[in-house]
Structure formats: C-alpha cells, structure tokens
Amino acid sequence: MANRSVVQIDEDLCVGCQECTKVCPAFAIEGDAGRPQKIVAERCVMCGQCVQVCTGYVSALEQGYEAYSKKRAERGLPDTVNEPLFAAYNTSHVNEVIAALADPAKFTIVQAAPAVRVALSEDFGLPLGTLSAGKMAAAFRRLGFKQIYDTNFAADLTIMEEGTELVERVTKGGVLPMFTSCCPGWVRFIENAYPELTKHLSTCKSPQQMAGAVFKTCGATLNGVDPASVYTVSVMPCTAKAFEAAREEMKASGFRDIDVVITTRELAYIIKQAGIDFAALPDEPFDDPLGEYTGAGAIFGVTGGVMEAAVRTGYTLITGKELSGKSVDITPVRGTEGWRKANIKAGDLTLRLGVVTGLKNVIPVLEELKAGKLDGMHFIEVMTCPEGCVSGGGQPKLVSGAYRAEAYAARRESTFVHDRELPKRKSHESAAVTKIYAEFLEKPNSRKSHELLHTRYRTV
Ligand code: SF4
Ligand code: SF4
C-alpha cells in the first residue's frame, strides 16, 4: 500500500482556507485555519476532490513569471501551461506520455474513460458538457498514438464479468450484497477502514485495468506486435487511477496493465503543447475492435451508470429475454442523492439494488451492513466523487461552486444523450466483446478471464 499520496498540498501556496478539509471524504486533511494544510497519506483515497476545490494558487500575472515557472517546472508540466497552479495538485505524468509518443520502440495504445469525453472540451472553451468523443479520437491520432482504443469497450467487458459474477452469487449463495469495484478511491477506503467487508467487493478489475490487460494480450495479438513493446496510456477523470494502476496485483499478464495515467486536465495540456486546434478537429472514430462501445459502457461516468448497465445485461442473463424501447432506461437507479435504493423485477426475481455516491455517504451504509440491516440486498454501486466520475478530481477545474454544479449537470445530461444516440445500448450487444470472448477469453468468468480481468483485495 502506497504511503505517499498521488495528491499533494504545496505548503508554499496553501492559504489555509480549509475548503479541502471540508470536502475530503476520508478525513485525511489536517491543519489549522489560515495555516498550510497537510494530507495524511495513509488515510487519503486519492480522489482529488481537494484539487477541485482548492483556492490557493500561483499565477504568472499575480506572483510573476519566475515564481510561476518554478512551480510549473517542479510539477513536471510543459512550459505551454499558463493557467494558475493551485496548492492541491496531483503528481503529473505528462512528460512520460510525451516521451513515449516520441519513442519508435513503443507501440502506444491509448484509452479514455467515459467521463473524459463530456468534459475535455471545457478546457478548449466549448460549452459545459459538450460531447467530444470524435474530436478526442482525432486528437489522439494527431498526437501519434498507434492505436486509439477505449475504456468504454472495457466498461462493456466489465458488465459481462460483473453481471455474471452477480448472477452466480445470487443463484449459488455467494457473499451478498456485492459491491462494485471500479472506483479505486472506494476500494482503497474499504481496504483501509473496513477490511473485514472486502469480501463483498466484486472481484472484477476496473474497466481501466481490464482494458490494459486485454490490450497487452489479445490486443497485441490482434495488432501483430510483441506484447513487451505495448505501452498503455490511460486518460482518466480521476487522480486515484494512477494509484490503482501502480497496485502490485495489476500485472497478471506478466506486464503492468497500465503504464501511465494522466487526467483529463493533463490531456488538454498535451493537446495544447502539440499545437492542435481541438475545437476545429473533425469527429473521427476509435480504432476497431477494442474501440467499440455501447450506451451501457458510456454511462459508467455518471452515478448509477454502472448499476444501470449491469441491469440491462443482468436482466437478459436472468430471464433470457431482452429489454427494449424505453425499458432500457433503468430510471429508478438514476439521480444524484447520496444513497438511493431500487427494486427491479427480472422474471421471478426481484433485484434489490442500491447506489451510493460521495464516499462520506457509504459509512452509514457499511454500518447498516455490519448490523445485518442490508440482508436481502443484492448489489450496491459505490462511487467516491459527488456525482460519480463526471465530477472526478482529474476533470477540468471549475473555481466557483455554482459553476461546478452546472458543469456536473451538463456532463451528466450529455452522457445520457450519448447513450440514447448510440446504436447499441447493452453491453452484451458489443461485437468487440463477443469477439474477445470467442477468440481469447472463452466466456465470462472463465479461467482465462479470472487470470486477466479479476483481482484480489487486502482483507486485514
Ligand atoms: S485526494 Fe481525496 S482523500 Fe486525499 S486528501 Fe484530497 S480530498 Fe482527501
Ligand atoms: S468516482 Fe470516478 S473519478 Fe471519483 S475516485 Fe471513483 S473512479 Fe475516480
């Protein structure tokens, strides 16, 4: 377990406003008002919510170019970055990505999480929530990535694995309720604070990690390249994903699933540094086959989205029938309340489901679980950030709280529009997922799937 957080507070810049202390869901920030705050690394879940709300900064305009450029260099940021740098920040890996793109020996494969495509455009002056999946793929191509694949493909794969695991736990008497495991902040929190409950976590890796494991195995075969030359770059709305990628369990293929993680903000830095006019780019496709995704993969970025995607496929796994028309929208699990429950009928079975968003809201739920008050529940989604990954710590920074709320609503709405407009909306309809099972993994939860796509947790 890392004892240094990927998120830091620069005491030269911290003004002691304590906005971070108020927002931190892990009670990991300490300090007196008006004095620099400190992160207790052992408790920090690396969500980056402190980065989003931080008010202390350095700017070239106010403190002078020399003071500003010194901080920019310390953080390893390109010298084309000219926006204010805030006291709370995450360790940057921008230069590693730029170096990998210039290295002909590396077969670079990029992926971007569902929530990146509804926020990236904000850093280029486009309206809040503008969907820019096609422009993002075009930018990746201009930057020189060899393959433009997608986390959303692996979100669909996650649903196949997690949905199958849930049905097995329900029908064969496994540990219930099962918790989602795709948010690394949540996984770190339960390992730290409630290790005796980690048996409730799904054993599935997150979509980021599943994608990396597939790119370095099946993907290398499909591309006819040596797996050792594959270098996987992941663009995430999330600061905790860098921590997840560095976990020692995340290399079951013999290689690190993910070589480097950057945030949405840092992708914008790289695009600007390359002189690409993002707003003027045409829409381009992701590369086949591991860039294909359904609406179910797209909604992973919003709170309740993993649950909704799981129900769309779980219903078919349980009943053998398909949801169609408006019934594909599982509206009872949508919303932004911190803890919400829903019952969904699937044939003779009533699925008892829950959704938690905002990590502070999970504590009473875990206490209820320990007290036996959640008996009979089947599946609970947990996301650390206030509205899921659209509000992640690595997303474009929005200084005013009101503007932040407006942005989250716009990103959420854009995500659901994207889902509605995609030709396929259920993970089991993905041709890419079908191909990967037919040619490499055999079937969900097979021995090979378990080796590559599942993980283990700290239990004490
Ligand atoms: S990264 Fe998240 S958990 Fe860590 S100090 Fe910041 S707000 Fe708290
Ligand atoms: S909710 Fe999303 S962005 Fe926030 S910590 Fe979890 S995975 Fe990262």
Image (spheres, rainbow, N blue to C red):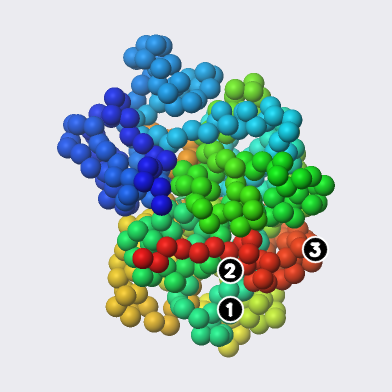
Residue type marked 1: Val
Name the residue carrying label 2.
162
Residue displayed at 30% across by 67% down: 364
Pointer 3 with pointer 2, Cβ within 8 A: no
Q: Residue at x 68, y 27 (%)?
A: 102
Q: Residues within 10 Å of mark 1 (few under 14, many from 20)?
A: some
The mark nearer the N terminus, 3 or 2, is: 2
Instruction: Name the amino acid type tagged 3.
Output: Glu
Q: Is residue 339 above or below residue 3?
A: below
Badge 3 density bin: few <14, some 14–19, many ≥20, Cα 10 Å = few
- SS of the residue at dot 3? helix
Residue 409: x percent and y percent?
Answer: 47, 48
Q: Which mark is residue 439?
A: 3
The span from disc 3 to disc 1 (Cα, nearest Å) is 24 Å
Residue extending farthest to the bottom is 348
Q: Which residue is mark 1?
A: 167
Which residue is at the front of the view, 7 or 250?
A: 250
